[in-house]
Image (spheres, grey):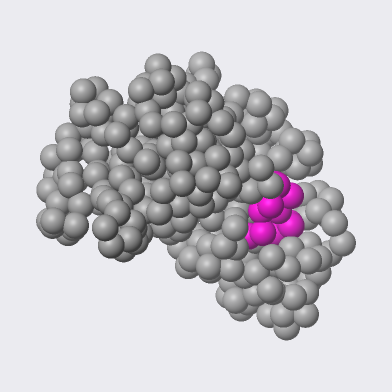
Amino acid sequence: MLIGSPKEIKNHEYRVGLTPESAKELVMQGHDVWIETQAGSGIDASDEQYVAAGAKIVDGPDAIFAECEMVVKVKEPQAVERKKLREGQILYTYLHLAPDPDQTRDLLDSGVTAIAYETVTGPRGQLPLLKPMSQVAGRMSVQAGATALEKAHGGRGVLLGGVPGVMPGKVVVIGGGVVGFNAAQMAVGLGADVTILDRDPEVLEKVGTHFEARASTRFSNAANLHDAVTNADLVIGAVLIPGAAAPKLVTREMLKDMQKGAVLVDVAIDQGGCFETSKPTTHAEPTYVIDDIVHYCVANMPGAVARTSTYALNNVTLPHALRIARMGWKDALAADPHLAEGLNVHEGQVTYEAVATELGYDYRPTAELLR
């Protein structure tokens, strides 16, 4: 198979779909790999390293989109990229379609077969291709929130860990999954006063057992959520419904009861955000203020630590890429029901139920395509 990886063009996105090591693995299995020149510059991977791995360097993205049978990316294709996609081509990347009707429409119009990292499942229902970026984003959310809390950035002027004689900052983590767990780890490590909210008793038990007295747990109902949020210095939204838009848990009305200069970090922004006042931001302009509350809603947080993120991502995406390249998308999905969960769009049809429901499209089950 001819496989290509273009340079990412989303604002301040420095990751790349294939590392030189991943390119070499594909080449060793008999595939041809094209890499756009300087695509790996954000992770300090030179064109020469890709050539040494057996890949071909091409100028610009046009040849990759025009000729490659599979395009491997990191972030969802931007509008200019979506115009280059075509029927019969495989797109393998993060998509997050539910809150993005424009992208969904363009992918349907292109006829592409789009496999989304974020909906590929594991044997126990987990999301293994999303997990490493959730780990990165969870840890980064506390760093970003700590910076936003500084007075110069519009925050309350609170040091999360406090100092002797001064109380630490209060951090509320909404959601105890991968993002929330990693956020709590970082916040606890800084010495903050941490509370984790979730609706799943098993999740609460797990995080409670892990953190013991270093963090508190609360069941996430309306009263507990309002009480926790309004007393917090930093609130981290870490809620995920696989493939679907995130629920709006913190309303604009609640902002009026929060402490002036408190910070909201919405890690669910890729799926539309879990705060009513959230809107996507970039690393260039990461924050904005509504009702005296600082919002940090960067939609590609892991892109800021591109080298760590790219290698962590390739560790989990490469095995599926190798399988798709060896078997073709149809046989690869038929052989692996977990990979089949990643198919979101195929030749003008929506094949992921949550996306179809959210955006009002007819749903075509992947199983029907694989018969």
Q: Nearer the viewer, residue 81 or 196?
A: 196
In this view, 297 is above or below 91: above
The image quadrant where one finds the C terminus is top left
Residue found 64% across the figure and 48% down from its top = 283
Q: Nearer the viewer, residue 331 or 156?
A: 156
Q: x and y percent of residue 127 in the render? A: 37, 50
Q: Is residue 18 left or right of residue 211?
A: right
**Outermost residue toward the front?**
165
In this view, 308 is above or below 344: below
Q: x and y percent of residue 58 in the render? A: 84, 64
Q: Is residue 148 left or right of residue 33?
A: left
In this view, 312 is above or below 178: below
**Outermost residue toward the bottom?**
52
Is any part of residue 348 visible from this angle?
no
Secondary structure mainly formed by the magenta segment: loop
Residue 182: which quarter of the image? bottom left
Q: Nearer the viewer, residue 108 or 171?
A: 171
Is any part of residue 186 visible from this angle?
yes
Q: x and y percent of residue 212 in the render? A: 13, 57
Residue found 59% across the figure and 56% down from its top = 303
Q: x and y percent of residue 55 in the render? A: 73, 73
Q: Where does the magenta region start and end? A: 3-15
Q: Is residue 4 magenta?
A: yes
Residue found 47% across the figure and 36% down from its top = 261
The image quadrant where one finds the N terminus is bottom right
Q: Is residue 25 left or right of residue 194?
A: right
Q: Is residue 352 left or right of residue 27?
A: left
Residue 72: which quarter of the image? bottom right
